[in-house]
């Protein structure tokens, strides 16, 4: 894992924002941004209320997460900690946490946005949406 990627994890364990903030703590960082992607109770494609998301991942997803975080950092001075949860998550649970520290805010925001957008398109993680009536639907690649 590149030194600027301090944490890249795919896990069934609940995600901890404080652990991500601690991982990117650096005296040279004047800015820290975070993103928390949570399970919500609705989806535009759902016929009813969403009660859970069930995430599965390819065995190489964790190394892929580290690579996409490093690519999002590029030649910036940013530091990244990112995790994606797998398993069954209830409404309100965190599915993705990203923390980015950098000397300046614009860079921190941009790198954070690149990480989440790339997760959505490139990370081999799939989710099955579960509705209140038991209907399920697979939602494809990404978080």
Image: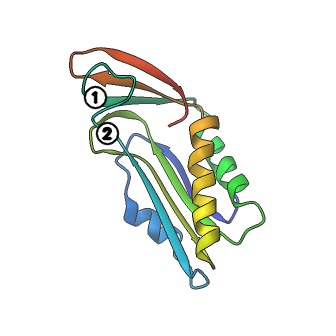
Report whether 70 appears left or right of 27. right
Secondary structure at badge 2 equals loop
Q: Position of residue 131 (x, y in %)?
A: 27, 22
Q: Is residue 59 above or below residue 15?
A: above
Mark earlier in primary sequence (2, 1): 2
Residue identifier under label 1: 50
> Which quarter of the figure has residue 113?
bottom right
Looking at the rendered image, the quarter that the N terminus falls into is: bottom right
Residue 40 bears which disc, if any? Answer: 2
Residue 3 location (% of width, % of height): 68, 65
Coloured how? Answer: rainbow
From the viewer's perspective, tell me whether residue 78 is left or right of residue 18: right
Please state if 4 lies on the left or on the right of 50 as rendered: right
Q: Residue furthest bottom?
A: 27
Neighbour tally class for label 1: few under 14, some 14-19, many 20 plus, Cα within 10 Å = many
Residue lying at the far front in this picture: please name it: 44
Q: Are marks 2 and 1 in contact (CB under 8 Å)?
A: yes
Residue at horizontal 55%, vertical 34%?
Answer: 142
Q: What residue is at 70 percent from the left and 60 percent from the top?
A: 2
- Where does the image place residue 25, in percent across and percent down from the top left? 51, 76
Residue at left offset 57%, top offset 64%: 109
């Amino acid at each position: 894992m590149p030194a600027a990627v301090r944490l890249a994890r795919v896990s069934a364990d609940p995600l901890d924002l404080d652990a991500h903030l601690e991982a990117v703590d650096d005296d040279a960082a004047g800015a820290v941004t975070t993103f928390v992607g949570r399970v919500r109770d609705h989806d535009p494609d759902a016929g009813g209320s969403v009660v859970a998301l069930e995430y599965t991942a390819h065995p190489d997803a964790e190394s892929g997460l580290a690579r996409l975080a490093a690519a999002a950092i590029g030649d910036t001075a940013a530091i990244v900690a990112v995790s994606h949860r797998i398993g069954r998550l209830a409404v309100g649970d965190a599915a993705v946490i990203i923390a980015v520290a950098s000397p300046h805010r614009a860079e921190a925001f941009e790198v954070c946005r690149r990480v989440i957008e790339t997760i959505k398109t490139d990370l081999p993680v799939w989710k099955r949406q579960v509705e209140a009536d038991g209907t399920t639907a697979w939602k494809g690649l990404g978080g």
